[in-house]
Amino acid sequence: MSLIRKTAAELGAMIAAGDVSAVEVAEAHLDRMAEVEPKVKAFLHVDREVTLEQARAVDARLRAGEKLGPLAGVPIAHKDIFSTHDMPTTAASKILEGWRPPYDATVTKRLREAGLVFLGKTNLDEFAMGSSTENSAYHPTHNPWDLTKVPGGSSGGSSAAVAAYEAPLSTGTDTGGSIRQPAAVTGIVGMKPTYGGSSRYGIIAFASSLDTPGPFARNVLDAALLHEAFSGHDPMDSTSVDAPVPSVVEAAKSPDIAGMRIGVVKEFSGEGYQAGVLARYNEVVKLLESLGATVVEVSCPSFTTALPAYYLIAPSECSSNLARFDAMRYGLRVGDDGTRSAEEVMALTRAAGFGPEVKRRIMLGTYALSSGYYDAYYGQAQKVRTLIARDFEAAYQQVDVLVSPTTPTTAFAIGERADDPMAMYLADLCTIPSNLAGNAAMSVPCGLADEDGLPVGLQIMAPVLADDRCYRVGAAVEKALESRWGGPLLKEAPSL
Ligand code: GLN
């Protein structure tokens, strides 16, 4: 089997045993990228030499007998929102075009130390605002399952790269669903860890009380290995949780859910959901029951108010975070010809440098935070957030995990929702509550919809710092479905 078809765990073991070098593995993936990138366009930045240099350095460390983790030498792609000192970091915005951070994010730093080899930076919706990757200031990314469809968003470059076998692993960030939704619509595994369980340091901020970095992989164990490699307390992030990382690798290796109590969220199915999504979802719920879990229906009435609350909180935090792009400190500067004031240069730069969705969010957020409206909008949304956390708490009195479809529909067509922000926002209906409550949540593939043959994701939600439960249930679903299909769901990205 060619190197690009191997799992990250297999590649790590082969490299550790000296059966293959990190350079050979990197070259195989760079060749795959050269072959499929013209169609998929998952990456914003690739530099073969920088990647091979990293791979050579890892081979040298291994030869010198350095003890590195299980993913040493394994290639990875990073969402272009993680700072990398040797590659540009743009958040897919014109305002940061060509910007090179002087330092690494904690996530990228830890992965470098663990010997992972960086293949490049992947496309996203500008500043991670969107659900389709069409809001990138550079180009859209195409879904490897059907090149006319979106790969989800905002981490759509990262999901497409893994689904297209360009990378065995990638990183993403999830503020309202941006790991789980793209994972679902490209047929891969995506995990949003507990908020604060993985460091935000060096990640370009969108909504700081929600932003969470997490892993993408083609199987649950690989996602767990990556999760463990970059998570854990970081003094550089004031909201980092000072607690041990949940044992996610162990959980991914123990797909036994007999006796587990699984809650089906009543509010997340039925009207507005694609028939093929519901069909696969209902089947997988039965499957969980057949594996010995007790399945009960759970009502979380406040979840229906999560979407409007999110679209007040996230833009409010975004309007404050994006104030730092002032034409003085980073990236683009427009109209600085010696005749204009700093304010004029700032206004011209922001007008030219931000795309329409980012401007919409900044305006919405500025309005929601303005005096006189603050209590009615932002204050009210924060109260809804409390209600959602209480719904979760009540549910977790009865069950160990909650499940729902990850998204109401499979991948939609490029262009289909681009001019309809409300339709776009609905892609995150099921994923947002976990962000508002800071809980752990995963998307794992659960089949293909009959009407379009596109992947469907099962969302598994667990309490704060119980990330391991997502992996245990995810691994059980993966194992049961693999034996039914006679192999992994994603054998081949069909359109490539
Ligand atoms: N799609 C949502 C938004 O546009 C979520 C984005 C994210 O999680 N980064 O805000």
Image: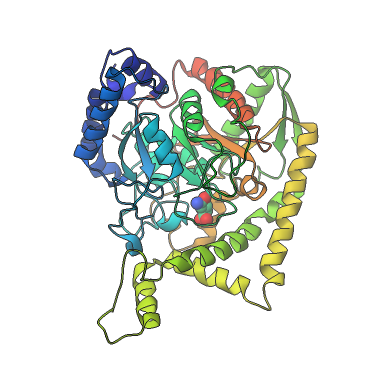
Q: Is residue 347 above or below residue 252?
A: below
Render colour scheme: rainbow
Please count the marks in the image.
Answer: 0
Residue occupying the far bottom of the picture = 339
Choose between 473 and 286: the one closer to the eye: 473
Write the residue at 52% across / 67% down. 319
Write the residue at 22% across / 42% down. 47
User: Is residue 300 at all visible to an observer of this figure?
Assistant: no
Query: Residue 330: horizontal and vertical position, in percent?
Result: 35, 64
Quadrant of the drawing holding the C terminus: top left
Specify the quadrant of the image occupied by residue 384.
bottom right
Quadrant of the drawing holding the N terminus: top left
Answer left or right for 81 relative to 63. right
Answer left or right for 231 relative to 244. left
Choose between 362 and 299: the one closer to the eye: 362
Answer left or right for 335 relative to 208. left
Choose between 369 and 139: the one closer to the eye: 369
Query: Residue 421: horizontal and vertical position, in percent?
Result: 50, 62
Write the residue at 52% across / 62% down. 318
Query: Residue 451: horizontal and vertical position, in percent?
Result: 48, 38
Query: Residue 201: horizontal and vertical position, in percent?
Result: 48, 48
Q: Is residue 327 above or below residue 389?
A: below
Write the residue at 31% across / 67% down. 332
Answer left or right for 233 relative to 491. right
Specify the quadrant of the image occupied by residue 377.
bottom right
User: Is residue 382 at all visible to an observer of this figure?
Assistant: yes
